[in-house]
Amino acid sequence: MAEANREIEVKFYVRDLATIESCLLSFDAHVTAPRTYEINLRFDTPNGDFKREGRVLRLRRDDAIRLTYKDGTEKKDGVLLRREIEFAVGDFDSAQKFIEALGYKIVLIYEKYRTTYEVNGTHIMLDEMPYGNFVEIEGELDSLKPIAGKLGLNWDAAVSASYAALFENVCKRCGFTFRDLSFENFKGLEIKPDDLGAQIADGN
């Protein structure tokens, strides 16, 4: 059964996930999903309507397989808010073929490793991306800033761009021509904050 939610989250670019993880353990956050590899397929219309309108159609495989649709993003004080509809599917390859049969095409494949913590109903995701490390905090609007403060994160450095948009920044600034945000494509490359168009949130 599809589940529709209001996604409320804030994201930070960080140098040191190990220190963030130590902070989480110090105030009794607990792991809800251990470090897991993800592969994500992003789809769009042939004319790029979803990208233009800020919408997302994504097929993800980690410890499960999920199909997700997100509306255009509303931004408020660094926080991203949007409707999200997500449901589980049984077969990754069949789901991909189904979406493509409807006329959508893959525009981006991206990988990451994610570890998820939870404290008092707020979820904190530690994301290892091919171009750097990030912390996402998702929950009720009034819970996000206090958690960020406990983790020593600079609220003013919150990243409003999606991982796909950050990838576009890197490709433009560094002249990369590959399509996908994969660990193989970024192997041996040094990506700087200016390349992403982001500020580091955990210290100077």
Image (cartoon, rainbow, N blue to C red):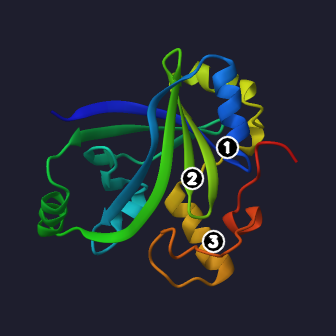
**Front of the two marks 1 and 3:** 1
Q: State the residue in front, 25 or 182.
A: 25
The residue tagged 1 is 17
Instruction: Specify whether 101 is left or right of 162.
Output: left
Query: Which residue is painted at 39% across and 31% down in the image?
Result: 6
Q: Earlier in the sequence, mark 1 or mark 2?
A: 1
Image coordinates of residue 201 in percent, x first then y, are 76, 44
Q: Secondary structure at mark 2?
A: strand
Q: Secondary structure at mark 1?
A: helix
Q: State the residue in front, 72 or 86.
A: 86
How far apart in space, not on screen, are marks 2 and 3 (Cα)?
A: 16 Å
The residue tagged 2 is 128
Q: Residues within 10 Å of mark 2 (few under 14, many from 20)?
A: some
Label of residue 202 in the image: none
How far apart in space, not on screen, are marks 1 and 2 (Cα)?
A: 9 Å
Residue 1 figure quarter = top left
